[in-house]
């Protein structure tokens, strides 16, 4: 079943399986066309330091780039940053870096900044950033090693080396923020925009 009323499907400028699942479960007809931009280079040259600003910039750039090559289509770009104080984390490159990230996050509250932007023909139509605050329980090395062994390759696919919808839920003692923000897509705000464009049937 789809609630989508657009003449053509929404384009998602991402290959994130979590974001795809959120859209599919919400009855949104969509196609994936990853932007494949150099996120770290864009971040480095932007001069931005605030995690929400960085997430917004990257979401906008993903939506803009794909909307230029997919003329006439609504394109949604999304990005998420993880910040522990002033330190910003990226996806770990492997198990060793994942362990380092978990040791740094252990026993602390960090923030996830999730941004979504929609563009059409290179023009920004909508953007929004949401924040979730995640308190990780204090972990000893044996617990981190056990988690990493069970999580396997999935640990390098998410910033912070965890996926809350999977085994990562065991790492936390408190969460403040909506589920969609944690998964990297402020879905309620995106749906509100799509309704304002008469693209949804509810």
Image (spheres, grey):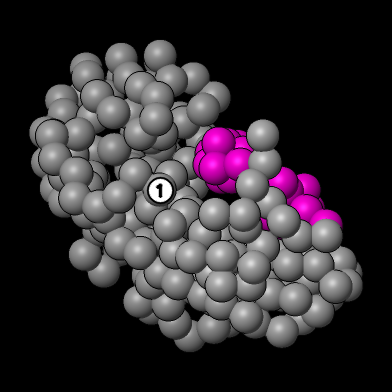
Q: Quadrant of residue 175?
A: top left
Q: Nearer the viewer, residue 198 or 59?
A: 198
Residue appearing at x 16%, y 29% in the figure: 139
Q: Which residue is mark 1?
A: 180
> Is 134 positioned to the left or the right of 199 in the image?
left
Q: How many marks?
A: 1
Expressed as whole percent of the image width and height from the top left, the position of residue 54 reads 46, 73
Q: Nearer the viewer, residue 190 or 104?
A: 190
Membership of 18 in magenta stretch? yes
Expressed as whole percent of the image width and height from the top left, the position of residue 5 reads 72, 56
Q: Which residues are magenta?
A: 8-35
> Is 197 positioned to the left or the right of 84 in the image?
right
126 is higher (above) or lower (below) than 112: below
> Is 35 positioned to the left or the right of 103 in the image?
right
> Is 117 positioned to the left or the right of 173 in the image?
right
Expressed as whole percent of the image width and height from the top left, the position of residue 187 reads 47, 54
Expressed as whole percent of the image width and height from the top left, the position of residue 144 reads 27, 24
Tell me the quadrant of the picture where the N terminus can be found. Answer: top right
Q: Nearer the viewer, residue 131 or 103?
A: 131
Is residue 50 at least partly visible in the picture?
yes
Is residue 35 at least partly visible in the picture?
no
Residue lying farthest to the front in this orientation = 202
Residue appearing at x 83%, y 60% in the figure: 7
Tell me the quadrant of the picture where the C terminus can be found. Answer: bottom right
116 is higher (above) or lower (below) than 172: below
Q: Quadrant of residue 183?
A: top left
Membership of 121 in magenta stretch? no
Q: Quadrant of residue 120?
A: bottom right
Secondary element at image label 1? helix
* Few, some or many residues within 10 Å of mark 1 (<14, 14–19, 20+): some
Residue appearing at x 46%, y 31% in the figure: 155
Residue appearing at x 24%, y 24% in the figure: 170
């Amino acid at each position: 079943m789809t609630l989508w009323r657009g003449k053509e499907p929404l384009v998602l400028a991402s290959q994130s399986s979590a974001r795809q699942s959120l859209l599919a479960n919400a009855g949104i007809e969509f196609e994936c066309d990853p932007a494949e931009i150099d996120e770290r280079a864009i971040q480095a040259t932007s001069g931005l330091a605030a995690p929400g600003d960085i997430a917004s910039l990257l979401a906008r750039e993903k939506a803009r780039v794909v909307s230029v090559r997919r003329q006439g289509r609504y394109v949604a770009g999304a990005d998420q940053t993880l910040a522990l104080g002033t330190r910003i984390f990226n996806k770990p490159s492997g198990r060793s870096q994942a362990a380092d990230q978990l040791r740094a996050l252990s026993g602390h509250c960090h923030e996830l900044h999730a941004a979504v932007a929609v563009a059409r023909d290179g023009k920004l139509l909508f953007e929004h950033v949401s924040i979730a605050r995640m308190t990780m329980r204090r972990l000893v090395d044996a617990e981190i090693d056990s988690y990493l062994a069970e999580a396997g390759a999935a640990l390098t696919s998410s910033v912070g080396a965890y996926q809350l919808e999977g085994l990562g839920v065991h790492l936390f003692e408190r969460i403040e923020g909506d589920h969609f923000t944690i998964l990297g897509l402020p879905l309620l705000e995106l749906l509100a925009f799509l309704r304002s464009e008469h693209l949804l049937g509810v």
